[in-house]
Image: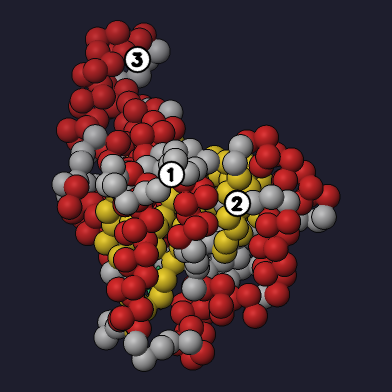
Amino acid sequence: MVVEITEVVCRVGRSFRQAASACGLAQKDSVRIAYNSAAMTVTVKSFAKINLGLYIGGLREDGFHELRTVYQTIGLHDLMTVNVERGRGIEIRCQHSAVPKDESNTCYRIVDRAMAALRAKGRVVIQIEKRLPVQGGMGGASTNAVAALIALERALKKNLRPEERLRIASEVGSDLPLFLIGGTVLGVGRGEQVFPVVDLPAMACVVVTPAVGVSTPKAFTEWDRKLTAPDASDRMNLLGRGLSAWLGEMYSGAPFRRGRRENPLLELVRAGIKNDFEEVVFPEYPELSKGKAALERVGAKYASLSGSGSTLYGLFASKEAANLAAAKLRKQGWIAQVTMTLPRREYWKKMLS
Ligand code: C5P
């Protein structure tokens, strides 16, 4: 950290020292000011994700379930500010009462690991401006953690190796690594093994956020209780092939297709992808099933629960269609927001802008 302080002072240069001394500040004071200067504070956007299909396989020995899913980052986001100060420890600040401020917070857990891996010292203050729903199935806690990590590295001007970053992220949660890739991402294993796939073009999206939170572990338990089939691994293979076919067809020049290329939205519908969580979450929260039906009624080309919910989303052919649909949904009493899916390049560009 001392190196960093020196760097800041050196960069600011003689004029800073002259100004400091003109103000009657000793060299030590000017160092402290430099330490707390904007150079150590980084703000980044923490974007949400939706799941384009999610298939749950068997319960593994480690207590997790095998998954196949396609994650897609979207434009809705929280704002994360990370500040590295003199001292020790990690402090989480957030106005939202449902966000834990202690060491159970994913941001705390990832920063704790990253500080150790980077051999960095200092007090890390993480400010979360919460806009995404908590327990909403949009990866809020996971994206916050990854954003905190990215902001921390920038604040410290130190970088983890990419594979180390992915390892630390996957230790904190299955849904974190996808946010180190962004755009359209294939998730396998427990969802933590992530592979960038060719981005879907940006699509208009209406996100409906019902006022309930769904616990992901509980939804998995309910899945086991009700639905795990004895042939779960066969099913994984079958569904894995379905996803591959959908992703592959869209971008390959292979001569299998008859007729003109379809809109990726329509191909998605045609592939019949689904989110398994709907089977256990909809019976428990009937209003979510009504929300999906409402999205379909106002013209969504594809509507689904995201993750284990409670967020529902609909994909629309255009921004105009999405705006119109959202207005209709709001009239019916739903909380509906219009956004766009975020391809990879935009994800990174907008995160840091
Ligand atoms: O990885 P993460 O901390 O997000 O997972 C939370 C909980 O969700 C796990 O403890 C586990 O109960 C459940 N889970 C699962 N299978 C997965 C991912 C999560 O059973 N693939």
What is the three-letter code of the residue carrying label 3? Ala
Q: Residues within 10 Å of mark 2 (few under 14, many from 20)?
A: some
Quadrant that contains the C terminus: top left
Which one is nearer the viewer's eye here, 283 or 140? Answer: 283
Q: Which residue is mark 3?
A: 20
Q: Is residue 147 above or below residue 189?
A: above
Circle 3 SS class: helix
Q: Is residue 335 visible?
A: no
Q: Marks 1/2: CA distance?
A: 20 Å
**Mark sitting earlier along the chain (1/2):** 1
Q: Which residue is mark 1?
A: 259
Q: Nearer the viewer, mark 3 or mark 1?
A: 1
Which one is nearer the viewer's eye here, 290 or 243? Answer: 243
The image shows residue 250 at horizontal and vertical percentages of 37, 47
Give the residue at the far right of this rendering. 331
**Mark sitting earlier along the chain (3/1):** 3
Q: How is the image coloured?
A: secondary structure
What is the three-letter code of the residue carrying label 2? Lys
Q: Is residue 147 above or below residue 41?
A: below
Q: Is residue 264 above or below residue 217?
A: above
The image shows residue 47 at horizontal and vertical percentages of 47, 45
Q: Marks 2/3: CA distance?
A: 61 Å
Q: Residues within 10 Å of mark 3 (few under 14, many from 20)?
A: some
Quadrant that contains the N terminus: top left
Classify the position of ligand 1 by quadrant: top left, top right, bottom left or bottom right.
Answer: bottom left
Left or right placement of residue 233 versus residue 140 in this view:
left
Q: Which residue is mark 2?
A: 301
The image shows residue 335 at horizontal and vertical percentages of 72, 53
